[in-house]
Image (spheres, coloured by chain):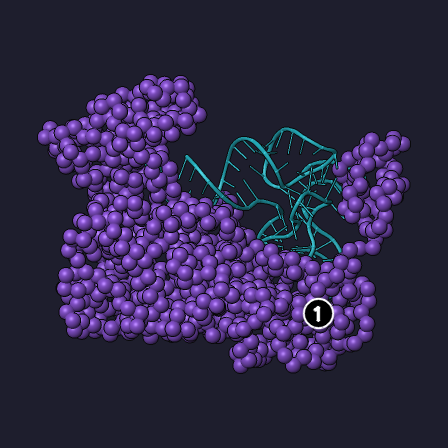
Chain colours: A purple, B cyan
Amino acid sequence: MGTYDFRRIEKAWQQYWKDHGTFTAEKESTKPKYYVLDMFPYPSGAGLHVGHPLGYIATDIVARYKRLKGFNVLHPMGFDAFGLPAEQYAIQTGIHPAETTRKNIDRYLEQMTILGLHHDPETQISTSDPDYYKWTQWIFVQLFEHWYDKHADKARPIADLEAHFAQYGTAGLKAATTYKGTFTAAAWQAMSRKAQADILMEYRLAYAGEATVNWCPALGTVLANEEIKDGKSERGGHPVERRKMRQWMLRITAYADRLLYALDRLDWSDAMKTMQTNWIGRSEGASIRFGVEGQTDELEVFTTRPDTLYGVTFMVVAPEHSIVDKITTAEQKEAVQAYVAAAQNRSEIERMAGTTKTGVFTGGYALHPITGARIPIWVSDYVVITYGTGAIMAVPSGDQRDWDFAKKFGIPIVKITEEGDIEEAAYDSKDARLINSDFLNGMTGHEAIKAMIAKLEELGKGEREITYRQRDVIWSRQRYWGEPTPITYDAEGVAQAVPLDQLPLTLPEVDEYKPSPDGEPPLGRAQDWKNLPDGSVRDLNTMPGLAGSSWYFLRYTDAYNDSHYADPKRLQYWMPVDLYVGGTEHAVGHLLYARFWTHFLHDIGECPVDEPFSRLVNQGMIQGTSQLAYRHQASNAFVSADLVTKETESQYSQLHVPVGFVRNGILDTEAYKAWVQDDSLVFETNEAGEFHTTSMVEKMSKSKYNTVDPAEICETYGADTLRLYEMFLGPIEVAKPWNTDGITGVAGFLKRFYNLFFGDQEEWLVSDDAPEEAELRELHKAIKQVEEGIERLAFNTCVPAYMVLAKELSRMGCRKRAILEPFVVLISPFAPHLAEELWARLGHDSSVLEAAFPQWEERYVVENQIEYPVQVNGKVRAKVSVAADASKEEVEKVALAHERVQEFLAGRSPRKVIVVPGRIVNVVV
RNA sequence: GCGGAUGUGGCGGAAUUGGUAGACGCGCUAGAUUUAGGAUCUAGUGCCGCAAGGCGUGGGGGUUCGAGUCCCUCCAUCCGCACCA
């Protein structure tokens, strides 16, 4: 037997690929393109475990396969290098985050090299590199310089808006804006420069405004909703409070509809589309304005059920609603103030857990927009200030939440549908016909919604309205390690964009990475940088981590371009991304903002496509298989798991032991003793002298001693084995446990594969003999299976194809070049190092990637003789072999003639015989 | 509560369109060979049964000559959202 020296082979070919620039995409090509992309990694300092490279291996396989299929392939890799961990580390140690980041990136690249993962070396970008963030800033400036025109349904330059204001004022304008007022052209022209700027700001797609933000005092910065988990910061787990602050925001809500409807065109999983759909949370209904007794202000509500307007018996406003103070009567003041204060202090979790309704009557009354009836206004935290208008019209007969509230506080319930028992519960079907509803009586809910909206519009009391759950995204962070916001403020406080020729606006050096002593963000420590010669000052915020990752896939097409964010020709050729692979954790963060930016750039003519990712696949997590040892609580002795019974189990505790010391459920007790450095430990083994553990599948984590280091696996078994095994484990999309024990299967396979080529004395066995029909059949079946497997990303089904082929060839003693050479190409996406080695030994002087993927032929894949299973009443009772081109009648005749079938027929004639050509025969008696 | 996904041997999983359920691998059993190895090779291995045979894809029901696959219903697990008006 030959020796498969994977260490030598893998090292040599990794060097070869690096030296030859094997993975550089062709700049000018007539070939069709294929763009395959992994989600941008954040180069963390923590080491990789075997779960991390799963997606990278999959894309590497696809990239190599597409190359062999004649595509010009772009498979880039870069780093999302701005972020909190490096900055926190800098605060603690004073080491510049750029340095930490550089080190981590180098480590990542080295790890990937060891696994045979190679990317286009000319695309290696990092978001913290000024050559890159120059263009991140440029896109921000473009957002600042544009507004969203709802007539044209696209972004347009701010200059167009100014021209419109100068000529028409706000008349005829339909824009995505936070500005509520109207003015004439004359009024516009009479305004001060500052007043004009303030109005324009409310239209910009990147705008500064007051926002209630999630402030994290420990980190000294605001956080996006996505960066918070259970009321704590996602990174670091610090408490977060709500606070009103002036912040930069991006008007993603302008794109809500487009982001929603374009989902239809994408080949993404339903789960992912649903998550985005829910996040956007579009809901259609009406905005209705209620008069308020004794007030000039109206109370505006949003409802999806304007048809239930005659069922309103009370109103509810959120505790934070501005109207509360105005309408609360003297008698109610104390109770309301106490309630509002209490609501503020209730944590998110408490509010969520609360199923019973709480609330207080304000003493104020609203006026029904049609009947003029007085409706009491209550305050309750089941209405949230962040959705809709923070106020609702409550219809207890038609909404269960309102019903619960009315029942608790003894508020009347008016029945407004024929059906439903409102004593028992609310009834919310839109199919029901209305009663007690004046002009709506007899209509179904569907009809009444339209009729009511028409009526409200006629009265000027409301109109059709669409509300989104999604909010504009806050784009300021009071941090150091991010892109500086390219904005300056002049003496009047008017914001100005930094022009392109002054970008990048690089990060200043600071003495410390903490907020400045007078409470400014860290950039405020660089006073020279902040204060400009003309008296204006720079914005001190940096952008969030999302910024750099919102467009990196565009930069990859032309990563070193200095005069444009990417050459339009390159964008035209490469976009969109054909296959995007990454975890599901970016479902509503990165993926939504990346889509938003691409739509925007498309609008302003800077990007040929609006949707960046045609096909998205989410790889499942690889879980750890923890190993646990029983330890007797009284004696502290460890006891083999097979000696522990149900009855005695309670006397033991279970202790995690490192998975590396366990093989097939048996612990290497000596290794364990050495590891804990305690020779005195007692292990009670079974009769065979073995110490058994129990296993449990859970998240891979250092603290559970169940992590497995891919570098160690490569050292023991080789990268090709690891790649093959990770793919063999199961479908890429589903979560599955890692268990190193199984790896011997694929390791053994690669050895046997190697031994098809080499004999006991390392002698070369491959001959130039002509192949047999049977050998060609095996080969072509395997080609077909592998090709189909890769195409539908069922990589786990490819591995058995290789195994079966190797086994068959070995059995037939086939050592023929005509079979083995295509086999080498076939296996090269999965086991690239070994394939390159064998390819070279076969006499080729270029990479196996220059080869063509073998083409399977129909004639070798279909059988001449088909062995039909013959069922009698749906159960297989016999098998008959028939020529493939036999007619149905012939197959039937042969099947019926079989003695086993005759036995079951027992002289009766069959009622029915079904022959499915090429498949099966079923005899019904 | 709402939405999405997933349930197949001791374990990971296969079966693309309704057509031989359990490919392939781990583990296990037996044998061979070698006894320094976590080595290699051969055969067997869903469950019950001596066998004939029966039962089997989370449970129950249905459609069909035929269901892991389609329909209804229930259960379990995981993920996302959560008083969204």
Q: Residues within 10 Å of mark 1 (few under 14, many from 20)?
A: many
Looking at the rendering, which quadrant does residue A404 occupy? top left
Instruction: Work out which quarter of the rendered image holds the C terminus of chain A and state it.
Output: top right
| Residue A286 shows up from this direction | yes
Write the residue at 14% across / 37% down.
A325
- In the image: residue A466, left or right of residue B76: left
Instruction: Work out which quarter of the rendered image holds the N terminus of chain A and state it.
Output: bottom right
Looking at the rendering, which quadrant does residue A567 occupy? bottom left
- Amino acid at pointer 1: Pro
Write the residue at 38% across / 52% down.
A154
Depicted A196 relative to depicted A327: above or below: below
Q: Output the chain of dot 1.
A: A
Q: Which residue is mark 1?
A: A822
Residue A560 percent across, percent down from the top left:
42, 74
Front residue of this view, candidates B67 and A586: A586
Write the residue at 78% across / 60% down.
A860
Q: Secondary structure at mark 1?
A: helix
Residue A79 percent across, percent down from the top left:
41, 68
Front residue of this view, candidates A325 and A222: A325
- In the image: residue A219, left or right of residue A588: left
Task: Give the total of numbered labels.
Answer: 1
Looking at the rendering, which quadrant does residue A898 occupy? top right
| Residue A752 shows up from this direction | no
